[in-house]
Image (cartoon, rainbow, N blue to C red):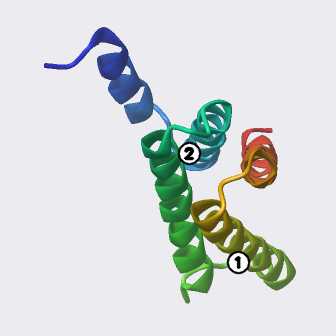
């Protein structure tokens, strides 16, 4: 059985498209990481936040490497570089969890979301 909040989230997600949907995905990553940052001792919360972030950026990498991606080559290269940074920071956060590592990931995801949502 779904809670009211869960039903709202599902319905809300169905009404999002394109850049807005992508922006919301990055905001969710930032939100999950921020929650984990506040409870660093909660390994489950940290694991879920990092797993979501890694999945999101893996999707970004796959899209950027796709032959169908018509994005400007310079922007594509910058985003691929950023995605590799996110990969490294996620692995670091898994090995040695630290609030500063999460803060960097939070800022990256918020900045990408801001660009998509503006």
Q: Residues within 10 Å of mark 2 (few under 14, many from 20)?
A: some
Residue shown at 76%/55% (left/top)?
101
The mark lying in front, picked from 2 and 1, is: 1
Find out whether the residues at labels 2 and 1 contact each other: C-beta distance under 8 Å: no
Q: Locate residue 94: give its quadrant.
A: bottom right
Give the residue at x 79% y 41%. Answer: 114
- Left or right of residue 49, residue 33 in this image: right
Residue 3 lies left or right of residue 38; in this view the side is left
Residue 2 in picture, x, y percent from top left: 20, 19
Q: Which of the two residues, 18 or 82, is positioned nearer the viewer here?
A: 82
Residue drawn 67% across the image and 68% down it: 92
Q: Earlier in the sequence, mark 2 or mark 1?
A: 2
Residue at the farthest left position: 1
Would you place residue 51 above or below residue 85 in this image? Answer: above
Q: Residue at x 54, y 63 (%)?
A: 54
Please tell me whether mark 1 sits on a helix, a strand or a loop: helix
Dividing the picture into quadrants, the one containing residue 57 is bottom right
Q: x, y (%) of residue 115?
A: 80, 47
Say which residue label 2 marks.
25
Label for residue 84?
Answer: 1
Is 104 on the left-hand or right-hand side of 35? right
């Amino acid at each position: 059985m779904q809670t009211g909040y869960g039903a709202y989230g599902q319905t809300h997600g169905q009404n999002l498209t394109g850049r807005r949907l992508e922006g919301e995905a990055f905001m969710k990553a930032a939100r999950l990481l921020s929650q984990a940052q506040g409870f660093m001792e909660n390994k489950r919360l940290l694991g879920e936040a990092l797993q979501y972030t890694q999945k999101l950026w893996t999707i970004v990498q796959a899209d950027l490497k796709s032959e169908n991606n018509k994005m400007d080559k310079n922007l594509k290269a910058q985003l691929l570089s950023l995605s590799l940074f996110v990969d490294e920071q996620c692995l670091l956060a898994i090995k040695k969890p630290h609030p500063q590592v999460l803060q960097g990931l939070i800022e990256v995801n918020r900045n990408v979301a801001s660009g998509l949502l503006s």
